[in-house]
Image (cartoon, grey):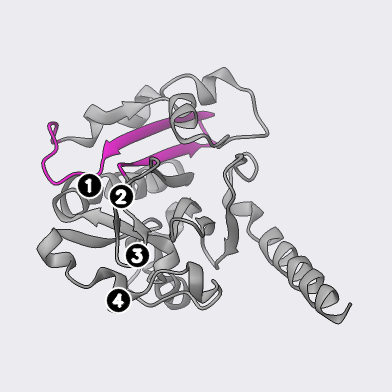
């Protein structure tokens, strides 16, 4: 009985803690039949796959006034102690990554948190990262991250969900850390009532060099990822159309 009560208490505490992260989502917490663990951070929220040892969706509310601070970039990644040892990635999993041409790739990027030391530090938890091929991470993906920040400045506020696609029997590294086949971002701009998505293969040798060439609707990403990313709205404009002004 004592063990059951402790377990229930932990579940309730976790649920209460995550409730403080609901403001990181534009239209509700994404839903899916895929089992995930909810993690709440100061400036982002995570839907984490214990079976894959990576986040499947990371969501942020990004304000234009938060962009362009002077907080120095944290320099070290570390395992997330909130996740059970059996299900968390560690730096040991990334041994040999240079030979594999793989980076430890941020989902919520450190560049979004240059005004907040605590948020910057949290962005280096491995529960906010995936194995990402280095040329993609340092090239087209970095450009897309910069574009998101520019949109936040231009429109005052954006919500951005960064996610991955994985397949059964997908490639893994280390102790079973999944290497995504694709990575995506869905950007929602409340001021315009519009969204735009980008779905990019996680590869070193991309056929296309510009993130604008990978534009896609939110609903197409939802179909590919098996997540309902905007569960509290059925707006065709938001889900089924591309906000063309956001891709210029």
- In three-dimensional space, the C-alpha distance between marks 1 and 4, rounded to whole angstroms, equals 29 Å
Within 10 Å of the Cα at label 3, are there few (<14), some (14-19), or many (20+) other Cα atoms? some
Q: Quadrant of residue 181?
A: top left
* Quarter of the image that includes the C terminus: top left
- In three-dimensional space, the C-alpha distance between marks 3 and 1, rounded to whole angstroms, equals 14 Å
Within 10 Å of the Cα at label 1, are there few (<14), some (14-19), or many (20+) other Cα atoms? some
Looking at the image, is mark 2 or mark 3 earlier in the sequence?
Answer: 3
Are the residues at dot 1 and dot 2 in contact (C-beta closer than 8 Å)?
Answer: yes
Is residue 191 within the magenta segment? yes
Disc nearest the viewer among 4 and 2: 4
Which structural element holds mark 4?
helix
Is residue 234 within the magenta segment? no
Q: Which mark is residue 31?
A: none
- Residue at (77%, 72%) from the top-left corner? 7
Are the residues at dot 4 and dot 3 in contact (C-beta closer than 8 Å)?
Answer: no
Which structural element holds mark 1?
helix
User: Left or right of 100: which side holds 188?
Assistant: right
Q: Which mark is residue 145?
A: 2
- In three-dimensional space, the C-alpha distance between marks 4 and 2, rounded to whole angstroms, equals 27 Å
- Disc tally is 4
Looking at the image, is mark 4 or mark 3 earlier in the sequence?
Answer: 4
Q: Which residues are magenta?
A: 181-209
Q: Which mark is residue 92?
A: 4
Q: Which mark is residue 143?
A: 1
Which structural element holds mark 2?
helix
Q: Quadrant of residue 16?
A: bottom right
Q: Which residue is mark 3?
A: 110
């Amino acid at each position: 009985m004592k063990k059951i009560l402790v377990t229930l208490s932990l579940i309730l505490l976790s649920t209460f803690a995550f409730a403080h992260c609901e403001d990181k989502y534009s239209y509700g917490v994404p839903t899916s039949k895929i089992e995930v663990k909810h993690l709440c951070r100061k400036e982002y929220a995570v839907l984490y796959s214990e079976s894959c040892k990576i986040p499947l969706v990371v969501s942020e509310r990004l304000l234009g006034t938060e962009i362009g601070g002077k907080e120095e970039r944290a320099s070290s990644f570390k395992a997330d102690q909130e996740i059970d040892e059996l299900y968390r990635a560690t730096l040991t999993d990334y041994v040999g990554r240079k030979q594999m041409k793989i980076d430890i790739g941020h989902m919520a990027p450190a560049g979004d948190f240059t005004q907040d030391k605590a948020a910057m530090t949290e962005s280096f938890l491995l529960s906010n990262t995936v194995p990402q091929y280095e040329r993609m991470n340092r090239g087209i993906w970095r450009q897309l991250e910069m574009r998101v920040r520019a949109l936040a400045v231009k429109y005052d506020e954006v919500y951005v969900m960064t996610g991955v696609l994985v397949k059964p029997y997908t490639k893994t590294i280390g102790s079973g850390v999944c290497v995504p086949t694709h990575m995506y971002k869905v950007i929602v701009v409340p001021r315009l009532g519009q969204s735009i998505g980008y779905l990019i293969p996680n590869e070193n040798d991309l056929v296309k060099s510009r993130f604008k060439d990978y534009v896609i609707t939110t609903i197409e990403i939802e179909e590919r990822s098996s997540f309902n990313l905007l569960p509290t709205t059925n707006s065709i404009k938001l889900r089924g159309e591309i906000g063309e002004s956001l891709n210029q």
